[in-house]
Amino acid sequence: MAAEIPFEVLAALSMGLALLIAWIIGANDAANSVATSVGGRILSLKKAMLFFSVFTFLGAVTQGYRVMKTLGKGIVPTEYLTPLAVFAAVLATFIWVYFCTWKGIPVSTSHSAVGGVLGAGLVVAGVTNINWGVMSSVVLSWVLSPLLAMSFALVMYKTLNYVVPRRFKGIASNYERTIRLLQIGVLCFTAYSFGANDVANAVGVVSAVLGERQLWFVGSTIWLAALGAAGIIVGGLTYGRRVIITIGSRITTLNPLSGFIAQFSMAITVLLFTIVPHVLWGYGMPISTTHSIVGAVIGVGLAKGIKAVDRTVTTYIISSWLLTVPCAAGIAIVIYLVLTIIGIA
């Protein structure tokens, strides 16, 4: 396929796919940074999204351009990832994440991409050429990251809910102001990290489609990162509300303290999964910030009692996590086969 399609068409196609993925990443993942601030009544949705937009963009253009990752890298050998396979994987990722976002369900866009690439890989490379080691690490992160974030949040909430009110007794206004400032600080840090890391997931499709034939001059990757960040921001502003409401108010009721603890626990979890495995084994373990923030919110809810957590909403979310890879893979397989049948190959 690559040899039959003009380079200009491939370039335009890759940019279109990149913007599509950037938009849906923003729509589903903006909640990871702002939901607890909104649900905890620290910031209005508009103010929270303003902080998110500014710091996501800063993270993307100052750090995100340094590593333009390929979507789902490592699951399938590069030689099998033809433009058609990449197109099927990316479109499958978009369809699954869009469906979940429409339902207000927070899912991992990275894991959705893994499923999309897995599905395309099964068709073009076969079962024996799939890197099942990468798949196992993804599955392991499904379990460990939300449990660790949940544990951090539960213990921290129990501790601070006991200590803080006594320490600040009589000066409640200072306590509230401190919590609000800390929460805004964590929001900004989370949004900056999100922009630095996830913009590569959005625009990495350019590398996947164009391969070695890229003609980007030195420095243009910053422009590419800025474009990806803009797509993410637009996605969050235009379609992020549903997932924000789910995490911020439907799992459990948040207040300023519990909102801060959940956000901080998520940040600590992501940091630990990045640093500790790298120190021990030389590489970081892939982790979903979505799984971490949901786990942390469940944790602060459980700290108040199991009845404080909406079990129906939680069941829907966890079920969608379990279905993410197989559903995205199945969609990618169907797309690839249909495109092949109609002669796009």
Image: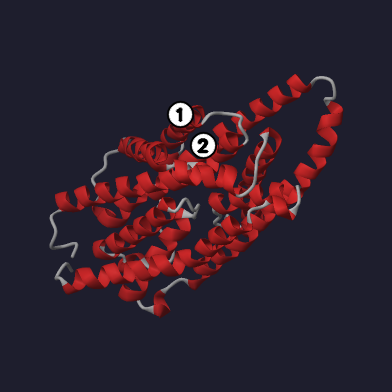
Could you tell whether 290 is left or right of 125 in the image?
right
Name the element at disc 2: helix
Q: Nearer the viewer, residue 282 or 284?
A: 284
Res 70 visible: no
Quadrant of the frame with the N terminus: bottom left
Q: Which residue is drawn at 63% across and 32% down?
A: 183
Q: Which residue is drawn at 29% across and 65% down?
A: 85
The count of marks equals 2
Residue 328, horizontal then vertical, whole percent: 40, 65
Residue 83, horizontal then vertical, whole percent: 25, 61
Say few, some or many: other residues with alpha carbon within 10 Å of mark 1 (under 14 / 14 to 19 / 20 or more). some
Q: Which colour scheme is used?
A: secondary structure
Q: Residue at x 71, y 53 (%)?
A: 307
Mark pair 1, 2: CA separation? 8 Å
Q: In this view, does 236 lie above or below 311?
A: above
Q: Does the residue at mark 1 contact the one at mark 2 (Cβ under 8 Å)?
A: yes
Name the element at disc 1: helix
Residue 182, horizontal then vertical, whole percent: 66, 29
Q: Of the residues shown, which amino acid type is indicated by label 1?
A: Val
Q: Of the residues shown, which amino acid type is indicated by label 2?
A: Ala
Residue that mark 1 sits on: 54
Q: Which of 342 and 7 is in front in this view?
A: 342
Q: Which mark is residue 191?
A: 2
Res 6 visible: yes
Q: Which residue is drawn at 75% across and 24% down?
A: 175
Quadrant of the frame with the C terminus: bottom left
Say few, some or many: other residues with alpha carbon within 10 Å of mark 2 (under 14 / 14 to 19 / 20 or more). many
* Quadrant hosting residue 199: top left
Could you tell whether 41 is left or right of 70 in the image?
right
1 or 2: tag closer to the N-terminus: 1
Q: Which of 260 and 73 is in front in this view?
A: 260
